[in-house]
Image (cartoon, rainbow, N blue to C red):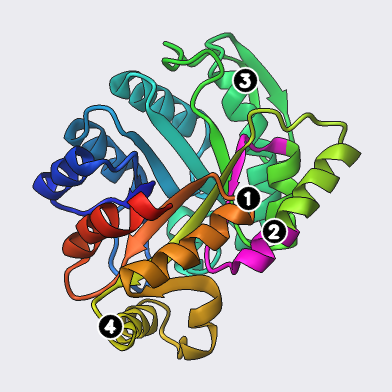
Amino acid sequence: MGFVAPASAVEVAELEAAGAASFWVGGHVASVNPSPEPLVWLARLIEQTATAVVGTATLALPLYPPGLLAKQLADLDRASGGRITVGAGVGGEYPADFDACEVPLAQRGARADEMIPLLRRFWTARPVTHDGPHHNFRDVRIHPAPARPRGPPIVVTGRRAPAIRRAARLGDGWMPYLYSPERYARAARDIHDEAERAERDLAGFAWYAYVFTSVADSTAEARRHMLEFLAGTFRQDADAVLDRVAAAGTPDEVAVQLRAFAEAGAGHLILCPCGPDPHATALRLLKDVVPQL
């Protein structure tokens, strides 16, 4: 069970001691909602943890030059002792991110498809020559290599058909959010089908689900906290979708809702605690919900 990482180092340590297996950071460059840049936050999180996996959820690949990104992630993987996972998507919900980084928004999918294999080639620490539609290199060597021979796992994030194809053909795993368990199960079948068409073996493929979660003594209180969070974050009425894409209720109810994601195929849940005290919610999830899963 993993959690969106709190900003406080003390809270991170407390959650890790309580049994959190992973911590995840996201961020943007120029979004409407103030946020950190994910690689900077990831570097900080590596130093705040001892054994937990630390990862990005999510990193918008097209915003970064591939050589620079490969170097940063290799260094971070070495600093963590091989504990990082790269949750990687295409971004696009905030066009200002792309304006700030001078990257054409319409190219984001194609750039991500080109970058994922490039990162792995750079992580061999051998010279790379590449002539592609967006990136060109000749005998560029990025070293030292990451802590692991293939580098950190690249888990494709996203909810729509292009992300599903990208995960099946290029990813080491898949991580959607705002998904129902039913939709998750259908998409998992699509990933298997796409991988079969590509003649790709999915042995070792990792299945994640990012779930907004609210737990309280009463169902009504938990739902209220969830709706307030979703409305503030996504700036729209979320009441119609809450029951399908989030887990909110008493500890017993949340356990049933999260178990549905596991039964749909999610092997690792990343929980985003919602409410007036997210840290207290995370601790309660570890104490009262996780033992039921």
The answer to which of marks 4 and 1 sits earlier in the sequence is 4
Real-space Cα separation, disc 4 to disc 1, in angstroms: 28 Å
In the rendered image, residue 72, in percent from the top left (x then y), is placed at 39, 29
Mark 4: amino acid: Ser
Residue at 39% x, 21% y is: 82
Residue at which label 2 appears: 185
28 lies above or below 68: below
Real-space Cα separation, disc 4 to disc 2, in angstroms: 29 Å
| Left or right, residue 96 beside residue 172 | left
Q: Is residue 293 visible?
A: yes
Give the secondary structure at mark 2.
helix
The answer to which of marks 2 and 1 sits earlier in the sequence is 2
In the rendered image, residue 257, in percent from the top left (x then y), is placed at 48, 67
Which labelled disc corresponds to residue 128? none
Taking depth in this image into account, of 286 and 274 the one nearest to the observer is 286
Which labelled disc corresponds to residue 265? 1
Residue at which label 4 appears: 218
Q: Residues within 10 Å of mark 3 (few under 14, many from 20)?
A: many
Q: Are marks 4 and 3 in contact (CB under 8 Å)?
A: no
The answer to which of marks 4 and 3 sits earlier in the sequence is 3
Residue 176 counted in the magenta span:
yes
Task: Please state the extent of the stretch shown in magenta in the rendering.
Answer: 170-186
Q: Nearer the viewer, mark 4 or mark 1?
A: 4
Residue at 35% x, 40% y is: 22
Give the secondary structure at mark 1.
loop
Real-space Cα separation, disc 3 to disc 1, in angstroms: 30 Å
Residue at which label 3 appears: 121
Q: Are marks 2 and 1 in contact (CB under 8 Å)?
A: yes
Q: Residues within 10 Å of mark 4 (few under 14, many from 20)?
A: few
The answer to which of marks 4 and 2 sits earlier in the sequence is 2
